[in-house]
Amino acid sequence: MTAKCPQCFHDSQPGLGAYQCARACTRVHNPGSSKVLGYDVYLPPGLRWSPPQDRKRAGERPECPRCKGPARPACQTCNFAFPDRWLEGSTACIALAGPRSTGKSVYIAVLVKELTRLAISLGGMLQAQNEYTQRQYEYYEHQLFKERHLIPATRPMGPRDGVHAPLIYSLGVIAGRERFVAIRDVAGEDLEQAAVSRPEWLTFLGRADGIVHLVDPFAVPEVRDKLHGIVPTTGLAGAAVPPVNVLLNVLGAVSATPPGERPRYALTLSKFDVMHRLAEVEDTTWRRIMTNPGSAMSWDVPPEGIASVSGKGLTWNMQGADLIGQEIAGVLGLLGETKLLGALQNAPGGAPEYRLFAVSAMGAAPEAARPNPRGITPFRVLDPVTWILEKAWA
């Protein structure tokens, strides 16, 4: 089993390894990372190194070519420095996609909280694996949970102080092996423009273990019209580009990957609390659907009910998963949004392995650009991620 790079999602290759200075050497332009990210990147000096075959030199370790100090393993393609034990563990690389206004940043902030609960339920413990991850999540947490402000949208790709670096976590030792997850967000603006520019850096999506693609139901005109005057519209503005256009752009970026190696695709209705409010409209069809207590769209699942430890790492509990997928397909049909499913089923090169999900990171619509004063109550946030982890960790 090989470990993927948490930044470019390329598999690590056996044999000759890449290393990066572990000290504070002056950074230099790095062609590999610049090509992967689409802008000029400067990193500490690196080198290629393979263990010496001579037994007398067997204990030698790679060292920085400039300062002769210690070096740490890095990606052979983009030279991203791996966290400790990354190459010995079991890794999962997840990409988050979707248009602007789908709430990807808020979803990540709440997802990390829920991953903490999942790790504990599996006998592990969630830990950030580098300073960037710790710093970025502290920002998310401060904004959303302490200052109670909505998190600004992810900025478009560019030289922005590593803003598009992955969040990397260990969930601890599960089934005898340390389990890692890397999460990369992609700015909705970049995905909306991808059909025009087709940037090479987007090809990392095709190397992900899974893609969680968020679709904002408020981008559907019928939902906006029915909920007018019921749901505050702050933070729920419709997407600037139709959701299907962004989905087609992502599927285009994935199309270069051979069908058998493509990521699992979790097409996910975000902000599902908006859909729950359809129970209040003067429409008997929607009221009947959204007040059905037997519907999987009406009940949440705790972490211990979503996944359990198995010999391969994690077993995803399918209870309710097929049902909610069928229900979401029906909802999309009622909304006249079947083109989303059509795009998946007719993706270039063949349909990916996909499922339909519904999540709500906050559990209620924001008010005046702040989380609902009644608090944050996540709904099924872990569902799409645990489905991806099951296969990635196997």
Image: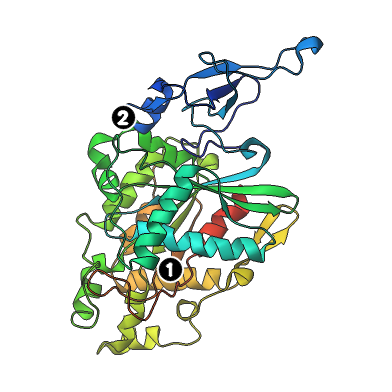
User: Does 229 appear above or below 306?
Assistant: below
| In the image: residue 266, left or right of residue 366 | right
User: Does 349 appear above or below 265?
Assistant: above
- From where the camera sits, is residue 348 visible? yes
Mark 2 or 1 closer to N-term? 2
Q: Where is residue 289 in the image (x, y as percent from the top left)?
A: 39, 84
Depth check, front residue: 161 or 226: 161
Q: What residue do we see at 57% from left, 17% from top?
A: 48
Task: Return the residue at label 1.
Answer: 358
Q: Do the residues labelled 2 and 1 touch (CB within 8 Å)?
A: no
| In the image: residue 376, left or right of residue 114 | left
Mark 1 residue element: strand
Residue count near mark 2 (Cα–Cα under 10 Å), binned few <14, some 14–19, many ≥20: some
**Residue type at numbered disc 1:** Ala
Q: What residue do we see at 36% from left, 64% from top?
A: 144
Depth check, front residue: 355 or 306: 306
Label 2 – label 1 distance at C-alpha: 35 Å
Q: Nearer the viewer, mark 2 or mark 1?
A: 2
**Residue type at numbered disc 2:** Tyr
User: Does 16 appear above or below 245?
Assistant: above
Task: Return the residue at label 2.
Answer: 39
Give the position of the N terminus as an image quadrant. top right
Q: Position of residue 252 (x, y in %)?
A: 35, 41
Q: Where is residue 247 in the image (x, y as percent from the top left)?
A: 33, 51
